[in-house]
């Protein structure tokens, strides 16, 4: 498939970028996307090295160089739009985004979050799941809306909590599942099968989608 038939994707990261790596591996294996840029708010993000390894342009936009969130997000939007993405993927981008930024990318920005949303929005999700005595935990891919970690869920991956789990062991198993479900959802989007309706409903193959476990759903 030529470059111009593939979905143009910009990835935003802050850290390790293992989800970015999963997407790049899927791209190499035929997922019809072209990651056209990786942008980080941190210069030391390991994910930048992963992008360099794949010859993908990178940029660092340090939030500490901006006086407030509005100014930073305006600069970020300008930077992102310069790459003309059809989809923006948040891959461990640890910033709260302004409504103006989020609304600009409505229906074309995805996030992955390490919990079974709507449970455990925000940080420290694995420890909070353990503290709550959950027997099941996991990850969610969702469209991004102005509500933090509150956008409509597209796909869940469920992970059983083991009696001897701590936050580290649980996080590792959840992360493995993240690496499965993010490429799956990006593939649906790239194939034109997935969209966010005006009413906030997610549609897959022209049918309203109920959030579902990855095991339930064909690729
Ligand atoms: C992932 O677990 C992702 O779900 C989480 O950050 C980690 C990034 O890992 N994102 C959030 O918590 C966003 N609310 P990675 O850099 O190795 O992909």
Image: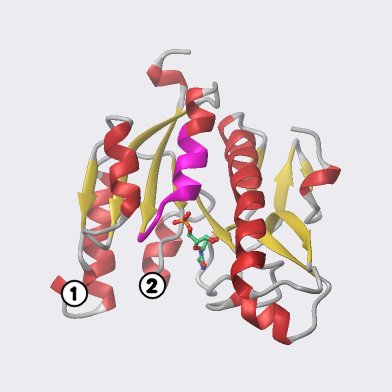
Tag count: 2
Is residue 37 visible to the viewer in this orientation of the structure? no
- Residue pictured at 14% horizontal, 71% vertical: 65
Q: Which residues are magenta?
A: 14-24
Q: Is residue 21 magenta?
A: yes
- Residue pictured at 23% horizontal, 53% vertical: 78
Which residue is at the front of the view, 164 or 213?
Answer: 164
- Residue pictured at 29% horizontal, 51% vertical: 39
- Distance from the alpha carbon under mark 2 to that under mark 1: 16 Å
- Residue pictured at 75% horizontal, 86% vertical: 132
Which residue is at the front of the view, 33 or 139?
Answer: 139
Q: Is residue 140 left or right of residue 147?
A: right
Q: Is residue 151 left or right of residue 45?
A: right
SS state under label 1: helix
Q: Establish whether ligand 1 lies closer than 8 Å to the Cβ of label 2.
A: no
For disc 1, the marked residue is: 64
Mark 2 closeness class: few <14, some 14–19, many ≥20 residues within 10 Å: some
Q: Name the outermost residue toward the left.
A: 65
Where is 130 relative to 55, above or below?
below
Which residue is at the front of the view, 217 or 192?
Answer: 217
- The image position of residue 150, as x and y in percent, is 61, 71
């Amino acid at each position: 498939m030529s470059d111009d038939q593939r979905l143009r994707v910009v990835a935003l990261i802050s850290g390790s970028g293992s989800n970015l790596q999963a997407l790049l591996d899927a791209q190499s294996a035929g997922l019809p996307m072209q990651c056209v840029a990786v942008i980080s708010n941190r210069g030391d993000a390991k994910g930048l090295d992963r992008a360099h390894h794949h010859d993908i342009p990178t940029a660092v936009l340090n939030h500490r160089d901006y006086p407030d969130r509005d100014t930073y997000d305006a600069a970020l939007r300008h930077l992102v739009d310069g790459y003309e993405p059809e989809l923006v993927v948040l891959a461990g981008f640890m910033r709260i985004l302004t409504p103006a930024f989020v609304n600009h990318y409505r229906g074309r920005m995805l996030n992955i979050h390490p919990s079974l949303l709507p449970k455990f929005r925000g940080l420290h999700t694995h420890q909070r799941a353990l503290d709550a005595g959950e027997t099941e935990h996991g990850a969610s891919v969702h469209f991004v809306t102005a509500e933090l970690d509150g956008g409509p869920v597209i796909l869940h991956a469920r992970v059983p909590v083991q009696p001897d789990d701590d936050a580290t062991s649980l996080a590792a198993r959840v992360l493995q599942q993240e690496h499965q479900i993010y490429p799956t959802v990006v593939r649906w989007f790239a194939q034109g099968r997935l969209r966010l309706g005006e009413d906030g409903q997610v549609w897959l193959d022209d049918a309203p989608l109920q959030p579902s476990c990855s095991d339930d759903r064909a690729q």
